[in-house]
Amino acid sequence: MAAENRRGAMFRVVVPHQHSRVTYVELFFDLLFVFAVTQISHTLLHHFTPIGAVQVTLLFLSVWWVWVFTAWVTNWLNPELTPVRILLFLMMLGGLVLSTTIPTAFEGRGLWFAIAYVVMQVGRTAFWFVSTPHHWTAVRHNAIRILAWLSTSAVFWILGGLAEGESRLWLWIIAVVIEYVSPAARFWIPGLGPSSLEAWAVEGGHMAERCALFIIIALGEAVVVNGATFAELSWTTEIVLAFVSSLVASIAMWWIYFHKGAEAGSELISTSAESGKLARLAYTYLHMPIVAGIILTAVSDELVLKHPSGHSDLKTILSTIGGPLLFLVGTILFKLSIRGFLQLSHIVGILALLAVGWFGSELSPLWLSLLTTAIMIVVAVWESVSLRSASESHSEATSA
C-alpha cells in the first residue's frame, strides 16, 4: 500500500481551470534542446541537397518527437519529486548524445543516434508505467500501448543504425512513420484496443506553456547564432542591414505567435473538455511546422549574413522564403484549431511570400531578406490591429 501511495504521489494534482507552472527542472531540460536545434540548422546548412533535406527533416522529426513525448509525460508526472527529476537528468544525458550525433547520424555515428533515441523514448515510457499505481488501470494501459508502439519502432531505429547509406534512411523513415501514426491511431494494440480520448486529458495551460517555451528556444537559438556570426564579420552596410533584418524577422515571428495566439491557445486548452484531443492536434502536430520554419529561417540568416550581395541562389531562396512560409502555415493552422477561422493576414502573408519567391533569383540575398521581413511585419501588425478592432466591437456590443 505504501508503495502504491508513493507511485500515486508522483503524479500532478490537476485542479480544473488552474494552470500548473512549468518547473525549473523542466526549463533546465528544455534548454538542452537549444543545442539540438543548433545542430539541426547547421546540419541542414552544410547538407542543403534534396537527400540532405530529407535526412535533416527526419532528424528534426525525431528530436521534436522525443521532446514532445517528454512534455506529455511530465504533464502528468510531478517534476518536483526526486525520482522524476532524476529521470529528466538522465534524459538530458541521452539528449546530449542525441544532439552530438546529429551531424554524423547518417555517417559514422548512426548507431549512437539510434541507441540514444530508443533509450530515451522507451526508458521514459517504462518509468511512467512503473510509476503508475496498479489500480490506475487506464493509465497503465496507455503506458503499455505506447511502449508497444515505441518498442516496435525501436527495432527499425536500431536496424537503421546498424545499416548504412540508403538502407539506414529507409529503415528510419519506417520508424518515424510508426511513431507519428501512433497517436492518430490512439495507440491501438491487440487485446487492449485503442485508448479513449478521455484518457489523454492534460493540464492544458502547462502543455501550452511548454510548447511556447520551445518556440522561445528556437527563436533564441537563431538570434544567438546570428549574433555570433555577425560578430566575426566585417561590418559593412550590407552586413549590418542583413543582421538587423534577421533580428526584426525574429521579433515579428515572436509577435505573430505570442501576441495573441499563444495566450488564446492556453486559455482554450485550459478550459476545454477535450484537452487531450486539442493537445494532440494543436501542440503535438501543428507546432512542428512552426519550429521547422524558425530553424529554416536561421539557415537563411546565416547565408544572407555571409553573402548579402549578388543574385540569390536556390539554397538562399528556398531557405529565405521557406522559413517564414512554414512558420505562417504552422501558425495559421494552429490558430485555426483554437479560433475556428483562418487569419486573413496570414493568408495574405503566405501569398506574398510565394510571389516574392517567384522573382527571388532576380533579387540579392539582402533584398530577399528585407522583403520577407517586411511581409512578416505586415502580418504581425495586421493581425494585431484586426484583433483589437474585433475586441473593441465585441466590447461595445456587450455594453450596449
Image (cartoon, helix red, strand yellow):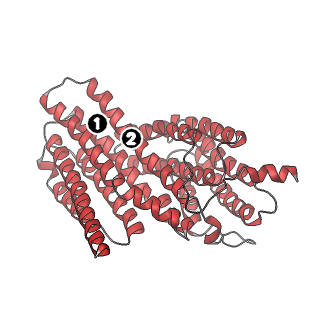
The reply to whether residue 55 is visible in this rendering is no
Seen at 24% across and 42% down, the residue is 248
Instruction: Kindly identify the amino acid type of the residue bearing the numbered disc 2.
Output: Ser
Q: Could you tell me residue 204's position as x and y percent? A: 53, 59
Q: Would you place residue 295 above or below residue 182 in this image?
A: above
Q: Mark 1–mark 2 contact, CB under 8 Å?
A: yes
Residue 156 horizontal side relative to residue 359, left or right: right
Q: Could you tell me residue 73's position as x and y percent? A: 63, 53
Front residue of this view, candidates 120 and 337? 337
Q: Residues within 10 Å of mark 1 (few under 14, many from 20)?
A: many
The reply to whether residue 338 is visible in this rendering is yes
Front residue of this view, candidates 274 and 236? 274
Instruction: Kindly identify the amino acid type of the residue bearing the numbered disc 1.
Output: Glu
Q: Residues within 10 Å of mark 2 (few under 14, many from 20)?
A: many
For disc 2, the marked residue is 41
Which quarter shows the C terminus?
bottom left
Seen at 21% across and 47% down, the residue is 373
Marks 1/2: CA–CA distance: 10 Å
For disc 1, the marked residue is 302
Q: Would you place residue 299 above or below residue 390 in this image?
A: above
